[in-house]
Structures are given as C-alpha cells and as structure tokens.
Amino acid sequence: MTEASAPAPGLQRAGARLPIDEYTRRLWDRRWFVAAYSSASSGVGYERSFVGQAWQVLTPLLHIVVYYLIFGILLHTNRGVPNFIAFLSVGVFMFAFCTTSLTSGARAITGNIGLVRALQFPRAVLPLATTLVAFQRLIYSLFVLFPILLITGEPLSLRWLELIPVIILELMFCLGLAFAVARVAALIPDTTQVLPFVAQVWRYTSGVMYSLAVFSKGHSGLVLVLLEHNPAYMYLTLARHALLVGNPASLSLWLSATAWSVGTLAVSYLYFWRGEEKYGNV
Amino acid sequence: MSEVATESPAAEELAAVEPETAEPTVVVDDLHLTYRIVGRRRGGAPAALRRVLLREKSPGQRSVHAVKGVSFTAYRGEAIGLIGPNGSGKSTLLRAVAGLMAPSSGAVWTSGQASLLGVSAAMMGAMSGDQNIMLGCLAIGMTPEEIEKEYQSICDFADIGEFVHLPMSTYSSGMAARLRFAIAAARAPEILLIDEALATGDVKFRRRSQKRILELREEAGTVFLVSHGLNIIRQSCTRAIWLENGRIVLDGDVNDVVDAYEERHDPGDRDAESPQRKPRS
C-alpha cells in the first residue's frame, strides 16, 4: 500500500497498522477482553456433557491410559525408564499444551471472523486468548499430575519449583506458535486440515511416550541433532528434570530452550503484527 | 435509555452542512476493495484432486470486486445515508471506513476511530447473554468498571429478561438482534457507522433504537447509515450516497438522491414504510 500523506490535517488512514510499541500498549489495554474471552470460551463445547469441563483433564488422562497400554505394555517403549507412568504423564500433559495452542491458534482469526469484521481492536488479542485457554488447561492438569507423581513413588522435592520457569518458557513458545499459525491459517484456509498431521509427527518425535536418550542410540548424527533440537522435546526434558528423579538436564539445554522461547515469540509477534490490516479481508 | 415512543425526527431539524466551513471527518479517495470468497466447488473429492494435480483454476474460488473507485468527503455534523440494491457494496464500504477491511487500492482517511454498529456484530452463540455483553463491551474498549455501570441499561434496552443467562443460540432472531444493538450502542464513537440496525426487531424496538441513534448522533461527529428503509434514510439523514455495483451513482441532498433512486427502483411505490422491504433490482 502506498503511504500517501493525509488529504487534510488531523486525518489518519482508517485501519492503519500502529507502530509496534503503540500496538503493544493497545494490546495491554484489552487485557480484560483477553481474560474474559479466555474464561468464557474455555467452557464452550462442554455444556451438553454430563461431567462438563472435567473433560479438559479427563481427555489427557485417557491419552495417558491409551499410550500406557500401547507403548508401555505392547511395544515396551518403557525400557530404560524407571517410572514410566510418571514419565508418560509429564510428557502427555506438557505436550498437550503445545498441540492445543497450535490447533486453537489456527482458529484464532478464522474462527472469530465475525468479531474481526465487526469491531476494531488489536488482532493479537485473539491468538493471545486462545493460548491462555490452553494454558489454563495445563494448569488444571497439574492438579492431576502431582497426585500421579506421588502415587507412583516420586518424592516431593523442592526441585519441583523448577517447573515454574519451564512452564513460563513453554508459554512463551506456544504464544509465538499461536501468533504464527493464526496468520498462516488466515492466509491459507487449508492449514487447519494439515495441522493434525503436523501435530502427530511432532508428538512422535518429541519423546512424549519414550525416552529419546534410550531410543536414539542406534541413530547417526543428523537425526539425533534434529530430534534433540526440537523445542517441545526440550520443554519435556526440562519438566521431567524438575519433577522426576534421575532425569538430568544440562545448562546448555536451559539456554537453548530459552533461546527458542524468546526467539519464537519475538519473530512470530512481529510476523503477526505485519498482517494486522488484512485480517478482516479473509 | 428509557422506553419512550417518540415520533420520528423531522427532517427540518437536521441542518445541512456547508462544506466550505466544515471540517472533514472522512475522506474516501478512489477506494477499491476486492475480497476472496471461497464457495463450494462442483464435483466432489475426485474433481477437486484432479484440479490440484492438473493445476487448473478452481471455479469456486473467485474474488469479488465489491467497491470500484469510490471517492467522497464527509464533514462533521453530517448524517449520510447509503442506499443501493443488495450487493452494491454498501456494507463493504462501511467496513473499509471502519478500518476493518483493507483497501486493495486507494485509501480511507478518518479524523478518529470509526465504529461499526451492525446487526451482524460479533456474538458467540454458545455463550450466554451476559457473557456476550461483557465480551462485546470489552472488545470495543470499555473497562470493566464502565461495563458494570452500563450493564443494567444494556439489559433494559435489549429487554430480553431472564434469557440473559441462557446461551445466545437459544434466542429468537429478534432477541439476538436487540442484544447486539444494545451492546454496540453502549458507547458513542466519533464516527458512527450503522448497518441496517434499524431494520431489526419489532416496531417498539425500532422506535427505541431510532431514539438511541439520534442520541448517538448528537455525540458523534458523523453518522453513516445503511438501510433499505428509504423513509428512515429521509428522516434521519442530511445527505445520501447511491451506490450501484460498487460505484457511486449519485451523491447529494438526501431528498434528491432518494427521489432519483425511487424513480429507478421503486416507481409507483413511494411509500416504503416497511424497512424489511428490499428494493427490487
């Protein structure tokens, strides 16, 4: 679009994209909208079921049962893992946050097009809200995770507090993911059809239900490098380090996880902001 | 916003604005707007796959050139009616003025934030009426304190009673329209864009919403009104723009433009009292 000067003093171009600092300030002004949208939409979809929002926790719990039966008992991916149920539970709950952010982020613009075409507000509000809904679900699932850990014999330890920075890093990464995929899905409607497969490949390469350290022994350099530089794998490893006995994490893992979080969020936020004017034309 | 059955405002009250002295609030400069629509393609999955493999152009996906080179300037104090048959680009033009859709070429300049008051405003069917009030008001930038103050008057204005706690998908179309209008009209913007809002609801609600629009007009700098009810345009506007096929046919004093429009589209039927009536095209 050409940047012509205003035809009369005091006029601004309608719908013009604000500079990034002003945009971010407007985004902060709508924090109540983000909060209200998150709490209202986290209950949507469960009204007609008997146990209601309990499904937010029951679904990953059932995933754990299914993965335990298939991978733990049938395929024996539990070798080399002392407390497989706890290992699996941390993996499933932490990874579910990534996939939920991804799939709901893709619908942030396309699923709210009525809102986008009716009201003027920083569009970044929408991916932010969908990610916070997924985040809220992660926090709920922690109330199920801690009892599982204690029952399966993990000792309660001060190291569990290290989960807090891990969750913050993963939240930043997922937020970035949601910004990026929201714009891509707005440009290419077919994205939502492809995403389940992306999520599936990602799940199987992130060591959710097996220990990458044990299983990657037979693989050569490049595969191992790719597997180990998967950010989801980093967050899972760090979370297991915090919660489970005998899962060491190096300083370099913390550093590269931080780099992924900060980098993804910064780049994706700018990428989303650059598309700001066009979201209503979808 | 109490319920008063007022008479419609007389056209004489609405003083015409002299362009020389007035300050412009909206300048639309050679605006073109094209958007993509993705329709259902013929032939099902095998045909679609063949199109992908052979790189054929899909017949269902096409772009609509909704606004084709529109230019005008609106001044403070004006109330402008947009008239034209269905699909003539009226609603798209309003969305461009509100900054909700980006122009393909040309530009729209405004003196402040324009806000669109439309019957299709954002509402979430699965959520209850009070949640929708909260969300809608927050989305237009009200603070929680402001909403708390306005909440009761929004409920009273929408007049939906106990239904406010039920999901909006259980509402009748009239109730949903009333609630949408009540939320959108809760705050007076600098430039007010009204899209068919008057055509919703029963007669009682139409009177009430017309009164509210009049109040908003006094607070707002400039008002645009899209309606198929030509009498409503005559009563509440000072100027009218007649759009057809994305282009301006006529722009000028409301009575002149509406007269010419009626001559073209509704000859012999000058009394279009019912706003539900759509002009034949």
Image (spheres, coloured by chain):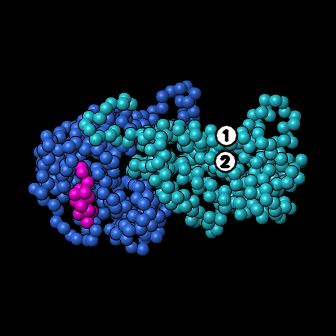
User: What range of the chain is rendered magenta?
Assistant: B208-222
Say which amino acid is labelled 2: Leu
x and y, in percent, of residue A200 in the image:
70, 43
Q: Residue drawn at (64%, 49%), measured in percent from left and top?
A: A171
- Chain seen in blue: B
Question: Residue under circle 2?
Answer: A169
- Residue B88 falls in image quadrant: top left
| Vertical comparison of A223 with B241: above or below | above
How many marks can you see? 2
Look at 19% across and 49% down and name the residue there: B78
User: Does residue A64 appear in the picture of this structure?
Assistant: no
**In this view of the protein, can residue A12 be seen by the observer?**
yes
Q: Which one is earlier in the sequence, the residue at label 2 or at label 1?
A: 2
In this view, the residue in front, A202 or B19, is: B19
Q: Nearer the viewer, residue A83 or A10?
A: A10
Badge 2 element: helix
**Secondary structure category for the residue under label 1:** helix
- Does residue B178 appear to the left or right of B167 in the view shown? left
| Helix, strand or loop: magenta stretch | helix
Q: Which of the chains is cyan?
A: A
Report the side of A82 relative to B176 (left or right): right
Q: State how far apart marks 2 and 1 are (Cα).
A: 9 Å
The chain containing the residue under callout 2 comes to A
Amino acid under disc 1: Trp
Q: Residue at point 42% right, 37% down?
A: B36
Asked if the residue at tag 1 contacts the one at tag 2, i.e. Cβ–Cβ closer than 8 Å, the answer is: yes
Q: Chain of mark 1?
A: A
Which quadrant of the view contains residue A43?
Answer: bottom right
What mark, if any, has residue A260 been given in the picture?
1
**Could you tell me which residue is drawn at 32 percent across and 68 percent down?**
B157
Q: Judge from the rendering whether residue B210 lies leftward or rightward of residue A22; answer left or right.
A: left
